[in-house]
Image (spheres, rainbow, N blue to C red):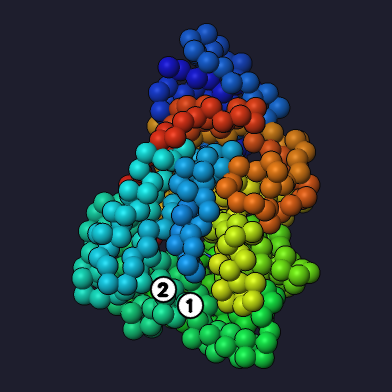
Amino acid sequence: MQTLIAGGVVVSATGSAPAEVLVEGERIVAVVEPGTQLAESIAEGADLVVDATGKLVVPGGVDAHTHMEMPFGGTRASDTFETGTRAAAFGGTTTIADFAIQRRGESLRRSLDAWFAKADGQCAVDYGFHMILSDVNDQSLAEMDDLVAEGVTSFKLFMAYPGVFYSTDGDIVLAMQRAAAGGSTIMMHAENGIAIDVLVDEALARGDTAPRFHGLTRPERLEAEATHRAVELARVTGAPLYVVHLSASGALEEVVAARDRGQNAFAETCPQYLFLSDEDMARDGFEGAKYVCSPPLRARHHHDALWRGLRTNDLSVVSTDHCPFCFKEQKELGREDFSKIPNGIPGVEHRMDLIFQGVVRKEITLERWVEVTSTTPARMFGLYPRKGVVAPGADADLVVYDPRRRQTLSAESHHMAVDYSAYEGFEITGGVDTVVARGRVVVSGGRYTGARGDGRFVARGLNQYLL
Ligand code: URP
Ligand code: ZN
Ligand code: ZN
């Protein structure tokens, strides 16, 4: 089966040019200059032609940070691997990296197998796993190398959530030493959870129970402090560090300082930190619960710093940290106590569209849009050049993107299994037209044409930014 994507402008991280893309089976086999004899003979032989005239052709998005079905605060994230990856496909994301979670007392092997079982045969798009280490001990440290060998090459540690996922600085050093030796990357949730818990207890004792106190008890300085500590621990141990869901300028300054010294330190931000703010968390009544995530949404002035960071490559990646909880039954758990609101915001469907607004507003170039949403996450997490690029030999994960379409984001039209949209009523320019995942058209004209189980596990290599 040969499919030709014809008439579009192919955008890569390094440039854009009109080109025809020929897909055979699951792979891209040719990217050809239009109007040439070669292009014409290819067009004659194609079984299916997707017309991309007037549109952009970009590599499928890679969302390096999702939490499908994540157990949290007595409930679980409302998107399953099936619904969440289908929503991802609608939004032009053709690969996700989700987080398998080690429970305390459980081996990495057992935890990873549990996540394999959840995802197997369910996904619309390809998926990989990172592993959350919540019990650092001799066995789990030894198992890190086994996981690397089977393509789970990054490990998330938490400086927040004492008693749940929290690791001490000592645990962190041990895991980082192992990562440095084995070549894996440490992903860090950098917030000082010990200090935060004191502020949370004090707020609740005062009767300050509304959602906005979630933000007020997690000040940005405690993210900056933890980021500084993570950077220093990585510096001492020599481990590659990737700071997840960076939300504010203070933490960014710590990453910049590390990168300026030449340290292997990287960071991602997420759409919610670029478009939403603490004002959303302070909405009337309990509405603010929809916006509770950690780190929390910050004051608007941080947006400029984060867009600048994306322009300058101080921030390398935009991921979603997609972790949806329904407003009605799940966020409700914290109506009387903000600390019981499950943490997380839905977003896997809207990342490509929202970051495209950065192109529309001239915050970033078209090429940088592709780089931060696809190419860099593919390289950072060992998926390149299979993912993240439109080139012969790559998986045929392609998005035909209409840069002129107008759309309004809403829970009524989104495909995520969650009863609200954090971006309700947002009017945006640009939209996904067609999505090809490993050679199959899975979204076309707003309809899903794929099938459950199309997506496969992808074993990842090591971080390709390391020497
Ligand atoms: O609020 C968030 N971020 N929920 C998901 C878990 C995490 O820390 O990434
Ligand atoms: Zn986190
Ligand atoms: Zn997360």
Q: Is residue 131 left or right of residue 259?
A: left
Please state which of residues 258 and 305 is positioned toward the viewer in this rendering: 305
Please indicate, yes or no, whether residue 377 appears anywhere in the rendered image: no
Quarter of the image holding residue 422?
bottom right
Secondary structure, mark 2, is: loop
x, y percent for residue 423: 71, 54
In this rendering, position of residue 92 left or right of residue 124? right
Residue that label 1 marks: 160
Q: Residue at x 72, y 47 (%)?
A: 410
Where residue 307 sits: x, y (%)?
Answer: 68, 61
**Does residue 84 appear anywhere in the picture?**
yes
The x and y percentages for residue 413 are: 69, 41
Judging depth in this view, the residue of 228 and 171 nearest the camera is 171
Mark 1 C-beta to ligand 2 under 8 Å: yes
**x 63%, y 48%: residue:** 350
Classify mark 1: helix, strand or loop: loop
Distance from mark 2 CB to nearest ligand 1 atom below 8 Å = yes
| Residue at which label 2 appears | 165
Marks 2/1: CA–CA distance: 7 Å
Q: Are marks 2 and 1 in contact (CB under 8 Å)?
A: yes
Badge 1 density bin: few <14, some 14–19, many ≥20, Cα 10 Å: many
Placement of 399 over or under 185, stated as above or below: above
156 lies above or below 30: below
Query: Which residue is depicted at the point 60% across and 72% down?
Result: 334
**Mark 2 is on which residue type?**
Phe
